[in-house]
Image: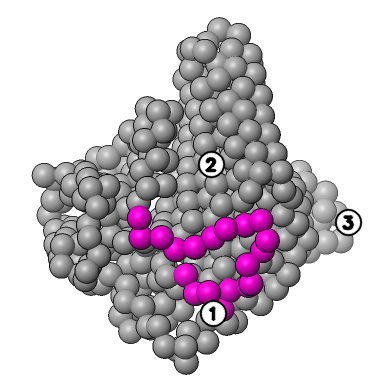
Amino acid sequence: MNMNTGFSKFIDSMRDYFENSNGTTQISDFRRNAWNEFERNGIPTRKTEDWKYVNLSFIGDIDFNYAKFISKINDIRKYDKFRTILPSAHNLIFVNGVFLPELSSPAIPQIEYCSLNTDTMLVNFSNNVNLNNRIKSHKNPFSLLSEALTDNYFSIRIEDNVTIETPIHLINILDSSDESIISTTRCNISIGKNSEVSLIETNYKTGNNAGLGINLTNIIADNDSRCTYYKLQSDNNNSYFISETNFLQNRGSMLDSFSFSLDGKLIRNDLNIVLNGSGSESNLYGLYFADGKDLIDNHTSIYHANPDCSSNQTYKGILAGSGTGIFNGKIVVEEDAQRTKAYQSNKNILLSNDATINTKPQLEINADDVRCSHGATSGRLDEESLFYLRSRGISADDAKILLLKAFADDIISKVKYTELQDLISNLVSEKFTSNGNN
């Protein structure tokens, strides 16, 4: 057992909750196995390869308690404001991992969603042979904690042959008004054959105490389906977010995934994709901005398991102040995945001498008929471009902001949902303005 001395109090607290705070809920074998694996591995340290740039000392320093949810309707009305962030979306609100149907949008026909206290779907997902051999062996240890602690999960099932016009917006709220908390959310989404949907996941925190949110999302895209998935993290109110998102793409399915990490003391995103059927395609886009002493860590893994599939990754980072960015992108092409096309790019701009970027593109190719490439760059804003703009009468600060916007708009402009694109543009502009004068 690896107790990691500095984290033993946290692990003891979580063990007490796991063993004693489940009321009448039976602890399933699935949950107990997850706990045993988490306890055996412990909290990652700097010696853990996938976490070597991440300082998790806050877990030992802060007295976290597992989230307690207040269910009185008079109390939950304060969360109603979060529905106005994207008012035209189909908003599903979660507070400390609990779904609030009272505040969420009415159900959409051809979509089934509910909270379940059975692990059947999770077990079926995790036991899938492709996930078992690829994703599960690299599972985020905090996802194991989420699987162990959460006694229910949220399920969304979209029927075959439908197009959902309204984006489905999952709003995850941490409420740390009373104490520093850890909250876990588990969500499984199944997209039917030849169906199309846009999913948006946003994360927020209310309350002045520290909050650690752990989100685990599993998505199965069936044959010839199309999914657009957006993740937005923009909350620096003493917040820490750790997420794992797993996609299983069957034959002919298409995925466009967007990640926008713009604020947070610590953000860690693990995105794992298995191209499980021939002709499937994944396009991954990411934009991250770390300033102050924030740390943003993106780990992506794409597993090409079948022939004639393609993937493309474009992640861009902007680092200011003493901010730290991490990008680790892995592409694995297996022996049977002939005629694979896989590309990866990571570009970063550093705005200060104290900003840091750690980037690690990886290719593991086991087939011979492939077209694959990867690359990473980091540097300052282009001096010639700055000089050109200033020679046209533009101030130094405005010239800097214009170049940063052009850098970011390459990602933002690809967002198809106008309301969300406007929201992200405004958030990014605020970041640029606050850093443009530094």
Q: Which residue is mark 1?
A: 102
Q: Residue at x 49, y 74 (%)?
A: 100
Q: CA distance from mark 2 to mark 1?
A: 27 Å
User: What segment is highlighted magenta in the picture?
Assistant: 99-118
Q: Nearer the viewer, mark 1 or mark 3?
A: 1
Q: Which residue is mark 3?
A: 392
Taking 75 as reference, is 195 left or right? right
Q: CA distance from mark 1 to mark 3?
A: 55 Å
Q: Residue at x 40, y 83 (%)?
A: 71
* Mark 2 surroundings: few (<14), some (14-19) or many (≥20) residues within 10 A: many
Chief SS of the magenta region: loop
Name above or below for residue 127 compared with residue 115.
Answer: above
Amino acid tagged 3? Arg
* Mark 3 surroundings: few (<14), some (14-19) or many (≥20) residues within 10 A: few
User: Is residue 309 at least partly visible in the picture?
Assistant: no
Whole-percent x, y for residue 66 in the image: 28, 70
Q: Residue at x 68, y 70 (%)?
A: 86
Q: Secondary structure at mark 2?
A: strand
Taking 10 as reference, is 138 left or right? right
Q: Which residue is mark 2?
A: 220
Amino acid tagged 2? Ile
Answer yes or no: do the residues labelled 2 and 3 have beta carbons within 8 Å? no
Q: Nearer the viewer, mark 2 or mark 3?
A: 2
Location of residue 27 by image quarter: bottom left
Q: Quadrant of the N terminus?
A: top left
Lower position in the chain sequence, tag 1 or tag 3: 1
* Mark 1 surroundings: few (<14), some (14-19) or many (≥20) residues within 10 A: few
Amino acid tagged 1? Glu
| Disc number for residue 383 | none
Q: Identify which residue, 52 or 276, lies in the foreground.
A: 276
Whole-percent x, y for residue 325 in the image: 48, 49
